[in-house]
Image (cartoon, grey):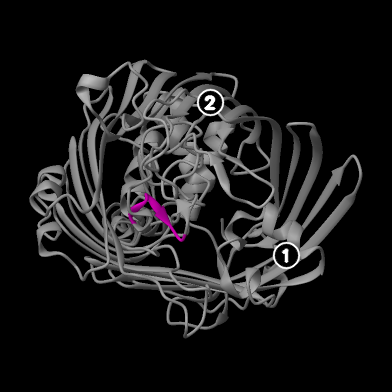
Amino acid sequence: MQKKSKAIGKFIYATILILFILPLLVFSQVENVPISHPVYEFLFRSESRGLLPHFSTSQLPLQRNEIISALNIINQNKDKLTDVEKHILDEHLIDFNVLPIEKAVLIYSETEKNQVFSSSFFHDNDKYIYYFQDSVNSVKLKPLASVEALFSSEEVKSRNVTLGELGFRLYGSLGKHFGYFLQATNGMLINGDRNLALEEFHKLKQNVKFADLNSDFDFSESHIRFDYDWFYAIIGRETRLVGSGIAQRLFVSNNAAPGDAFSIGARFSNFEYRYTHSGILAVDQAVNKAGFNSSFPEKYLVTHRFALKPDWGEVAFWEGIIYSKRGIDLAYINPLSFFKSLEHALHDRDNSLMGGDLTIRFLNNLQLKGSYLLDDIRFEEIGTGYWSNKSAWNIGLTYNFHFNLDIGLEYARVEPYTFSHFDSINSYTNDEMLIGTGLLPNSDEISLILKYWWFGSHHPMIFKVSNERHGANIYDENGDLIKNVGADPLQTRRPDDNFKVRFLDGELIKSLKFDFHISYEFIKDFQVEANYSYRTIIDTKTHLLFIKFSFVDF
């Protein structure tokens, strides 16, 4: 009887521990989670399935607490999930410390003393350099390592390149209101064709050390975040996505490198407002693109977004302004203002844009996503092909089958001259790359995406087919522009160019792409991923095979 009483006492103690202490451990995680985390794919599917009312993936990244709350809501509807979804949900609950998992560390702390260089190294436990977490504070230091190889085959030549990268990820929370994140990596060309790496690894194109100095490459993202009730503030450099879509994000995407930004916002269950002021890179005004004698004028991007989140989706209004060649303008510091009117009041020097995005869940498993961006308009010239009626839009529909298959279809279009400005410095670009969609002006694209969820990975298998058309500007043999059709965001209309434009005028470039991606985590934190791509651009046919081995927590 005494043993039975002790057992009951232990059970009650354990129950109290789970109900009261574990939520403190879980919900004191304030930092943002990078958009590369596979949880976003899972949340996108769950959102579409109707499991997450008043929730949206149209503005990323999300705070760790937001993701944990969403996962807990999905967990409450576990009876509606497939066996594969239940498995992936449990994996994410483990990743976010909602479900327990054994940890192994290189450097001991007060809370973790299991040595990683033991049998733990080959077991399914979380592996850290250092890990500490109590009820309100946490410090987590992860190693990052990868080797990636790319093989390219065209009709007349074959090329390959291998890259290696090492780094770390430091993140955690201080108290209940401060979160922090720092990721830094350094990599090098192991062997192969450097030009192939520049062509196919998008992030390397803007890396000065690798692209211009023929050296190694490094990347860093970091932020600190303060949360208190409905208010939050963020400062840092991180990749952001803004805009509703399946394959495209019109407003802010990962096409360009992330800019350093300060954001403040207000978040409620069915409404969110965010204001962001970013510092970005203008077009270089000197011959040298790097070094002490390069010249980059000051350039800033200011955005805000108002979003209503009813249980059936989201309706949002977005506005952006690009200004440059002066210090921070106090007019654009006020987070609650109408940028278009301010731009007029400041003598029409800047580049203003506005738009809206929409998410509608007609019924469970069927979801519509779309965005519309207006760069400039002359109402009396609507429908005439007037060059200054500049806009971009995308619309997509997804359906989620119960047998772990998602299908999405999207169309996106960017009108001529969109994102350009009379002052090329004020184009909607960061370091000469479009900030929003990767589609150049005078282009459209239709995409079909299939995702199949399986037990072997947090990521689904992805098959994507995209057909893109682009009307390019025409140049002579000396590189001089002889016909401007509004196809370059850094080139606006010149005095002698036609006032009227025709969509897809110029040199028509058609691209058809097939992509298949799969990944597998064979031991916790150790994974392999592969991507096969077949492309036809005009008359050139290319086969690409990408293989990556990595040690990373996601």
Quarter occupied by the C terminus = bottom right
Check residue 227 for magenta coloring.
no
Identify which residue is drawn at 69% across, 61% down. 550
Give residue 390's mark: none
Pointer 2 local density, CA inside 10 Å: few below 14, some 14–19, many at least 20: many
Counting from the top left corner in percent of width and height, residue 296 is at 39, 71
Question: Do the residues under discs 2 and 1 have CB atoms within 8 angstroms?
Answer: no
Q: Which residue is denoted by mark 1 in the rendering? A: 122
Quarter occupied by the N terminus = bottom left
Magenta region, residue range:
426-431
Can you tell which quarter of the image residue 149 is in? bottom right
Taking the image as shown, residue 72 lies to the left or right of residue 198, namely: left
Asked if residue 31 shows in the view, the reply is yes
Counting from the top left corner in percent of width and height, residue 447 is at 57, 26
Above or below, comparing residue 69 to residue 527 in the picture:
above
Give residue 504's mark: 2
Q: Amino acid at mark 1?
A: Phe
Taking the image as shown, residue 155 lies to the left or right of residue 129, namely: right
